[in-house]
Amino acid sequence: MNRGINTRCLHLEETEGKTENYGSLSFPIYQTATYAHPGVGESTGYDYSRLQNPTRDHLERIVAGLEHGKEAFALSSGMAAITLLFELFHPGDHIISEADLYGGSIRLFDHVSKKNGLEFTFLNCATDDIEGAILPNTKAVYIETPTNPMMNVSDIGKISGICKKHGLLLIVDNTFLSPYFQNPLLLGADVVIHSGTKFLGGHNDTLAGFIVTDRDEIVEKLRFLIKTTGAGLAPFDSWLLLRGIKTLGLRMERAQKNAIELSSWLKKQAVVTDVFYPGLPEHPGYEISKKQARGFGSMITFNVDTKEHALQILKEVKMIKFAESLGGTETLITYPTTQTHADVSEEVRLRNGITPCTLRLSTGIEDVEDLIAELSEVFARLD
């Protein structure tokens, strides 16, 4: 049965009509490290929670279904997911990567992956010539779309065509839109990455990461790697993600509605010089977004006229919290220069468009009138 995404956030068809777990509607937390065996060479299907756990297994099947993948792997954070995925590559392999990535991804690539012998070419994958950057040792293209924080939108289908032509993997970080608004595997990607901490969890109360794929050979490699490296998500955190995903659609729709109204309001403010939101018709990625996604999300990046005003805004907001992260029920404002991209060189930040005047908003589910009222008061007090 081809069920809607909100239904798939709640139900697995293969478990319906069964009364396992004493009929519990909330999937149980199997808080156990190990499992008893019926006999030598016999197993209940679970042996040790580093390998598999029923709560994590249930979560992985939910996420795989949402992304239309064969399997998902739940890990202890988004960075743990990217780190595990890059164990698929070998010294000397070349990766073409989006330049405007989350700063933690850039830090991993620059200080760990390169140390391990991987080579990188960083491009603006929305506009630059990806095919021209392919080398004999290129193995994959890694993108975020929209990007963090400058909201560049890459054409997943077009890039997938290039990758298939040259036998490359296409890896897409889908954190900003979540599987509710975008499904890269259906557009030709081979692997999808999520920071589950963000929209999938949705409540700023736990860390998680996901890798989803529809390729059998990648599934087998990742199953070996997650068992070997031990970065699988713990049972209680898996349960928190299951709880958060139940309201994914409701949260995404409400937060996006707020973002559309807030981005239009920000455009009219004298202190604001630029607004980057794919849902604005003038955004360069607007038409691509309409083609490949079901929504524009709730992430807004904007520039103000001076660094001093940016810092004053961060100090004076109250209901809107000055904090790391994104994708929760609360609206958060972030300063990429000293937070998400603090470990990225100033040269790279400026090249990507991140200046000391850049602020990033993760719009929550509050009444949008209250968000606008707070920002209006803060803007009015600027020196």
Image (spheres, grey):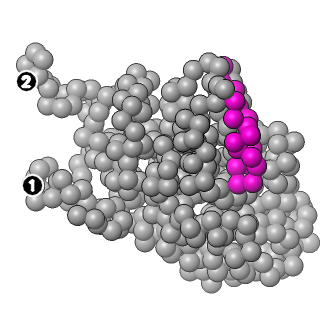
- Mark 2 is surrounded, within 10 Å at the Cα level, by few (under 14), some (14 to 19) or many (20 or more) other residues, namely few
Three-letter code for the amino acid on which mark 1 is drawn = Thr
> Toward the viewer: 230 or 219?
219
Dominant secondary structure of the residues highlighted in magenta in the image: loop
> Toward the viewer: 168 or 35?
168
Q: Please report the residue visible at 80 percent of the width from the left and 82 percent of the height from the top.
A: 268
Establish if 142 lies above or below 36. below
Residue 115: quarter of image: top right
**Residue 41 appears at what percent x and percent y?**
12, 17
Residue bearing mark 2: 38
**Residue 3 appears at what percent x and percent y?**
28, 66
Residue 284: quarter of image: bottom right
Q: Secondary structure at mark 1?
A: loop
Would residue 137 be found to the left or right of residue 292 on screen? right
- Mark 1 is surrounded, within 10 Å at the Cα level, by few (under 14), some (14 to 19) or many (20 or more) other residues, namely few
Residues shaded magenta: 116-135
Residue 261 visible, this angle = yes
Establish if 271 lies above or below 22. below
**Quadrant of the drawing holding the C terminus:** bottom right
Q: Secondary structure at mark 2?
A: loop
